[in-house]
Image: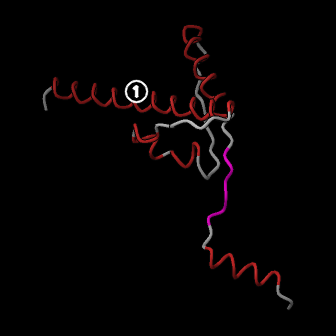
Amino acid sequence: MSASDYDYKLAKECIEINKSLFILRKVITMLNDMQNTGKTVYVPYRESKLTSLLKESIGGNSYSLMISALSPGDKCIEENISTLNYSTKAAYIANQPVKNQDPKARLIIELKVTSPP
């Protein structure tokens, strides 16, 4: 593999990562806006592989945790503020996890609980 091939593949990979992160930010912003306004909007989960994989975690049926990494340097203050704004929006997304259960199994459990011993 030549150096130019390697540089091309590296650049292409960087572009794909940045695109996925951009779409993730777009999804989090839309979910946040949807919760604030109460309006239903189209959330573009399918626009990137990352958001497709995280669909259930971001706005679905599970709890999620976001960890943000900040730089202590003064030269990165704009990036730090942007990261904190992004994390704050993600923190305000409230999911309502529901235990996935087979309807027949749920009925059996309910009958066991309600029936006398």
Q: Is residue 67 magenta?
A: no
> What crowding class fits label 1: few (fewer than 14 Cα within 10 Å), some (14-19), or many (20 or more)?
few
Kindly report the secondary structure that dominates the magenta region of the rendered protein: loop
Residue stretch in magenta: 95-100
Quarter of the image holding residue 90?
top right
Q: Quadrant of the C terminus?
A: bottom right
SS state under label 1: helix
Q: Residue furthest top?
A: 75
Q: Nearer the viewer, residue 30 or 73?
A: 30
Q: Is residue 2 above or below residue 66?
A: above
Residue visible at 57% across and 29% down in the picture: 29
Q: Is residue 113 above or below residue 48?
A: below
Q: Is residue 73 left or right of residue 18?
A: right
Name the spot of residue 48 as percent of width and height, x first.
40, 38
Name the spot of residue 60 as percent of width and height, x first.
59, 48
Quarter of the image holding residue 113?
bottom right
Q: Is residue 84 left or right of residue 13?
A: right
Residue visible at 76% across and 83% down in the picture: 111
User: To which residue does mark 1 refer?
Assistant: 18
